[in-house]
């Protein structure tokens, strides 16, 4: 990712945030992104995808010719966030967290706008718990969570499956 623009700055733009969210755990073409984000004008979508590719946030993993044009398939560059996690820059961390929370709120608003809203059926949940953990115990917890999620991270779209976004935060209490 370029030194001039941080990941937080890039994702502060709502369309870019939605593109990144749509690509979590999967590869998509711009056409598929357009189907998932029908309210985003095509030219706007292409422009923001281009910005994310140029910044190194998205990777082009496949190119193929379709009716004389090149269709690209994109994936998230999971290493892109590493450069934004270095150093205790309070303002940058605050911005990144604000972008994260704003993205969650926007995702939840889109869910609430559905005509067939049923949080019980859809198993919508949000929880908060306080845990007393040493650094070593936190590492163990994170490793166990990763181990528990791994088999599910490889699953693809299939009948009876709904894509669900899992978001976590670990913040030391004051």
Image: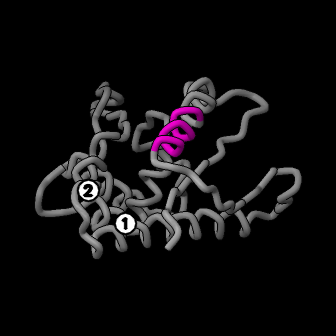
Check the image and report above or below for 158 versus 166.
above
Residue at 51%, 57% in the rendered image:
170
Asked which quadrant contains residue 130, the reply is bottom right
Q: Position of residue 124 (x, y in %)?
A: 77, 56
Q: Do the residues labelled 1 and 2 touch (CB within 8 Å)?
A: yes
Q: Nearer the viewer, residue 3 or 56?
A: 3
Check the image and report above or below for 97 versus 76.
below
Q: How is the image coloured?
A: one colour
Mark 2 Cα-neighbour bin, 10 Å: few <14, some 14–19, many ≥20: some
Residue at 30%, 49% in the rendered image:
81
Q: Position of residue 149 (x, y in %)?
A: 60, 32
The number of numbered discs placed on residues in the rendered structure image is: 2
Looking at the rendering, the stretch of residues picked out in magenta corresponds to 136-144
Check the image and report above or below for 119 versus 23.
below
Q: Nearer the viewer, residue 104 or 64?
A: 104
Mark 1 Cα-neighbour bin, 10 Å: few <14, some 14–19, many ≥20: many
Residue at 20%, 52% in the rendered image:
55
- Location of mark 2 (residue): 84
Q: Position of residue 37 (x, y in %)?
A: 52, 56
Q: In this view, does 115 lie to the left or right of 155?
A: right
- Location of mark 1 (residue): 96
Q: Earlier in the sequence, mark 1 or mark 2?
A: 2
């Amino acid at each position: 990712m370029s030194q001039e623009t941080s990941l937080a700055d890039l994702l502060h733009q709502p369309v870019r945030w939605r593109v990144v969210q749509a690509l979590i755990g999967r590869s998509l073409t711009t056409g598929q992104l357009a189907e998932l984000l029908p309210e985003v004008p095509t030219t706007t979508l292409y422009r923001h995808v281009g910005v994310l590719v140029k910044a190194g946030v998205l990777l082009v993993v496949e190119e193929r010719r379709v009716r004389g044009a090149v269709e690209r398939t994109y994936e998230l560059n999971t290493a892109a966030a590493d450069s934004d996690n270095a150093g205790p820059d309070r303002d940058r961390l605050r911005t990144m967290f604000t972008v994260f929370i704003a993205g969650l709120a926007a995702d939840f608003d889109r869910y609430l706008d559905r005509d067939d809203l049923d949080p019980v059926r859809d198993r919508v949940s949000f929880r908060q718990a306080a845990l007393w953990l040493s650094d070593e115990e936190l590492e163990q917890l994170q490793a166990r969570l990763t181990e528990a999620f791994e088999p599910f991270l490889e699953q693809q779209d299939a009948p009876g499956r709904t894509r669900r976004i899992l978001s976590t935060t670990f913040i030391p209490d004051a």
